[in-house]
Image: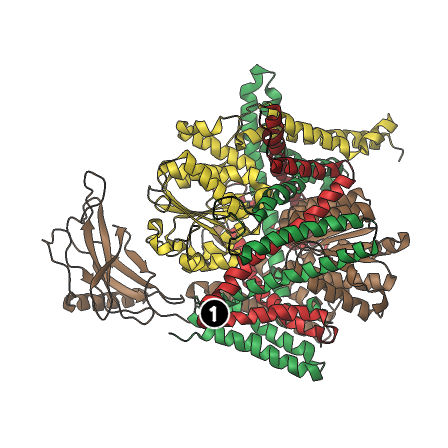
Amino acid sequence: MTLPPIGVWIAAFLTISALSFLYKDNPFFRFAESLFAGVSLGYYIGITLDQTLVPNLIEPLAHDFGKNWDLVVPGLLGLMLYMRYVPKIGWVSRYALAIYVTYYIGLDFTRRIHGEAMPQVARIIQPVFGPNPLAFVFVIGVLSVLVYFFFSREQGPVTRRISRLGIWFLMISFGAAFGFTVMGRVALLIGRLNFLILDWIYPILGI
Amino acid sequence: MKSAGCITLIGLFLAANVFAAPIDAPATPPPDLPLPQNLIAKDKPGDSGGAVVLRWTDPASLPAGAEIEVLRAEPPANEWQPLDKVPAGTGTYTDTSAKDGTAYRYGVRTSLAAADSAGAVSVAASTSAPVVSEPVSSHDNWFKIERTNSFVASILFVIIILGSIQVARSGKEIFIRRIPGLNAIDEAIGRATEVGKKVMYIPGIQSMDEIQTVASVAILGNVARSTARYGTDLDVPNKDPLTFASAREVVRSAYLAEGRPDLFREEMVNYVTYDQFAFTAAVSARMTREKPAAIFLIGYFFAESLILAETGQSTGAIQIAGQADPTQLPFFVATCDYTLIGEELYAASAYLTREPVLLGSIRGQDIAKGILILIAIIGVVLVSIHVLDLSPFLRTQ
Amino acid sequence: MRRFLERLLGLDRRWIFLFVLLSVAIPIIVPIGLPVTTTESTRKAFDFIEALKPGDTILISFDYGPSSAPENDPMAEAVMRQCALRKIRFIVIALYPLGGLNLANNAVAKVVSEFPDLKDGTDYVNLGYKDGASAVMRRMGDDIAGAFPTDQKGTPLSQIPIMKGIASLRQVQLVFTVATGIIGEWWITQVHPQSGTPVIIGPTAVSAPKYYAFLNSGQLVGMLGGMKGAAEYEKLIRARYPEMARFYTTTHDFTATKGMDGQTVMHLIVLLFILLGNSAFLLSRRGAPR
Amino acid sequence: MTFNLGPVVLVLLFAVVPIIGIFLGLNSPGLRSRIPIWVAVFAGLIPILAMYIPKGFLSGQTGMSQRMDDWLIILAGFALLLGIVNVLQNNFKKVARRDSGWFYSVVLLIGLFVTGGAGIYGAVTKIGIGFNPDGSPTPFKYLTDWFFQPLQSTIFALLAFFMASAAFRAFRARNVEATILLVAAGLVMVGRVPILELLAVPFPSLHASAASASQAMGKLTEWIMDVPNGAAQSGIIIGAALGAASMALRVILGIERGYLGLGKGE
């Protein structure tokens, strides 16, 4: 009989400690949780250095400075973030944050209009007396939900009914999505129990 | 009109082909395979350069297995280099390996690949001199024509929003309907003050590159002003470092604006860890140990939403959640006292501050929404009575 | 009676936790072998890949982490096995920062060991992981080598036979994203509009509902929704290729089909609790003085 | 060697202008917030213009948009240290003050230093963080595989339990809306898995009808997910897209600047 390697024992101990939170908060969980916080942060130090800063900044600068000289700037902006710790010139960090935020928000702007709003409206446009007799349910659903999202108008008797219908559609959606998700979550638990049973307990029992 | 232009072009190219001398064409075997016709090579429109589009008409009858071979000649050597083979019937090929500014000539010809007994493709059975295009070079362009629709939509949207903001600035009163989740914010903070426990605010787990986080941080500003007013303790654990940086500035300036910088502590806004679930474990544990009286889960959450909200629920806190993306809403709706759904998240800062500029843009969103509803209704009617399908005009590329 | 109903309504949730644990643990030890019904979205995905020609190329993107591996792993493995059988070439990449690469490596190694004929570089290639999924995708739309200059082993793309004639995503017949979070959606909202390459997604069950919108609008070809979708796919594969049964009948290796047993029992438990809660709620309300 | 306009413009906008702005800001407090917001307008416009203008300097492979992507990945990498500094501060303080639970801060710090150290070692020595040249896992990978991942998966797996307890408590027929929620959830849960077949196992005569009923439930589930759920999702997405785009516009134009800790307006 070969016992599972030490790593499996560690993982099993941490798994059970984490699961113990379900019963109540206890020292084992607290230990696992604190260790997790530390290890995970350390993990991202390694990942960020190895996968972002070294290949995207240090290596390009070291190998082909002529072509990548401009990468000094994000380094500079990165340093500006830390000016927060120098009370007198804390405002310098605004530059880095403002550039970072607005660039991605600009990207977001196009994504919302181009990638979401327009194709989704295109989707509504379908023949309601066509081959799919229930297509109108879809059309009514989207439009009533949109009516629910009107903020700047007082609801009249008609719009109140439509937006109530919109809420019903939202409730169907939330209920259905909840029910739909149960499976995926069980899958995760299966993964953990697979580990405990197949990789840890069975080998101990010699099965 | 367009087709007339096309015909002229084709004519031109046909003429050009007649006179174009084959540039160092490979030895010509008997021309037993008919050649493609009407070859046109053009810079690929609306791209960043580096691509040339070829179009041609396949010969009328081709034997089974015939392929069209695409060749390219590059100055100064001008030797034919095979680029690719495409099945008959394709009629078009995009060369994405062109160098901008280089004048290439392209050639197409029919070839019949024959496999030997080993299965490896041997030399094409028959090759004739290719049909040759005019010299063409690729370049980058000024406008992506296929995105005209979303371009126009974006411009219209900007005009509507900025116009509404302008109207609001000029002093026009703008109504905004009741949003229960936002009314509850003060109630929740009030209760925390009564029982002398802290308020916890989690601004999602995404960075500031996500607009929901930016919206959440704006709401945090309002929550922090309330906690400053009431003198209630605030705790803002963060998963993303940039969100953390921003949240701290926001909370600090909120306490300053309320004239209570003495109540602000740096630890109010703290960093936990970059891992989604390590963050979840740490924050859940903090909830059960410190039992905040009110918990805000506003921003972009992923799977951790239910762990956080269900743990918070079990501690008896008032919970207000908000997310624009629909995926986690079911879990917030099931476990929280109030949930800001979808667009309500973005309406929150306008609702809480009643600032004319923000209210104006809410009004603009409603106008845009109205227009979209109208387009949708007209589109549905037109397509249902088989007049016109508007949806292709809205599909984006 | 009233006291009992109230006790039931306020049942300590730890009892529910215990039932959940048992309902999932027992089927792992004693498999049940329940039947699975296939759905349209999964069939569409399967048929699309079946319709590809030998020699076509698909891109498989590992956009998930270990946390959702029990759900996503079987999807990736099933599609890779199908490709191996049908001589469809596949390019593997990983965009999920939290361990997507590890999973990609494991899955590739597993499938390659099952199909010893598969040759690295000609039948498949593993390009590894790149940070910044959105930017990487946008670049791949124009230039794959710009985003992934070399494969996982450091071979430049220009020297890899499978990449010949594949400069950008436009030359790829399909993108299959096995996804847990937002990255999968970007393939649909960013890459598909940019390059026109068809996309099939294998999302976790939680994000699956969202993708029906894209499925209907034609932005998606097909979908394998969660473990159920994966189990359906395994069923479709087993039905079409009886020789594949060897990967799906062993007891110790995990399959989505096996996972479905535990899920079914767990669903039943949750439904029973909801039923119990509602009966108690309605009865106690009827008995309550108004 | 071709001259790349894109990076040069970027450097001008996002390095030269900020540096000038910082110097000006030293003496003029008003400029400390105004110049960053002007600079930010350009940052926000780049990706929008790049979407529609395929000109090489803007959206080509060395264009401004592409280069910004490269830049900001680096900036985000730098930001992590900001968080780490805060964690170190808070936990060292706890240990120094012997606060309750300081022992757990020690555990946290050990985890952080050991894993972070292993990661830095891998990155600096160029061995990487995966495998040693001889194929054995690096210490970093060992920690990842046996400490980090099991914990990550287990916390994620807690969801299975919380789904059940949340369903039990939340899905009660309190009013019309709650009942709709409950019914939709129930139907989908039945339709997603072969529950009917499971229930029919002891009754052989019912097997066939259970299978066909299960199939029908599957179809119904698919319809619910597709049509009413799809409709609601579309509605949420469209509304949220407009809200987000309008917020984006306000942020880019500097109308909404709360995220910088600045008050609204001038």
Circle 1: element type: helix
Res D218 → quadrant: top right
Q: According to the colouring, which chain is green?
A: D
| Residue B397 place in picture, x, y as percent | 45, 58
Task: Tell me what hue chain A is rendered in.
Answer: red
Q: Residue at x 38, y 48 (%)?
A: C173
Q: Chain of mark 1?
A: A
Nearer the observer, C46 or D76: D76
| Residue D262 place in picture, x, y as percent | 72, 71
Q: Residue at x 54, y 63 (%)?
A: A110
Nearer the observer, A134 or D265: D265
| Residue A165 place in picture, x, y as percent | 67, 47
Nearer the observer, C273 or C18: C18
Decide if residue D234 is on the left or right side of residue C160. Answer: right
Task: Tell me what hue chain C is rendered in.
Answer: yellow
Q: Which residue is mark 1?
A: A68
| Residue C222 place in picture, x, y as percent | 47, 43
Figure quadrant of the N terminus of chain B: bottom left
Nearer the observer, A155 or D172: D172
Q: According to the colouring, which chain is brown?
A: B
Examine the rendering and report whether any part of residue B275 can be seen: no
Q: How is the image coloured?
A: by chain
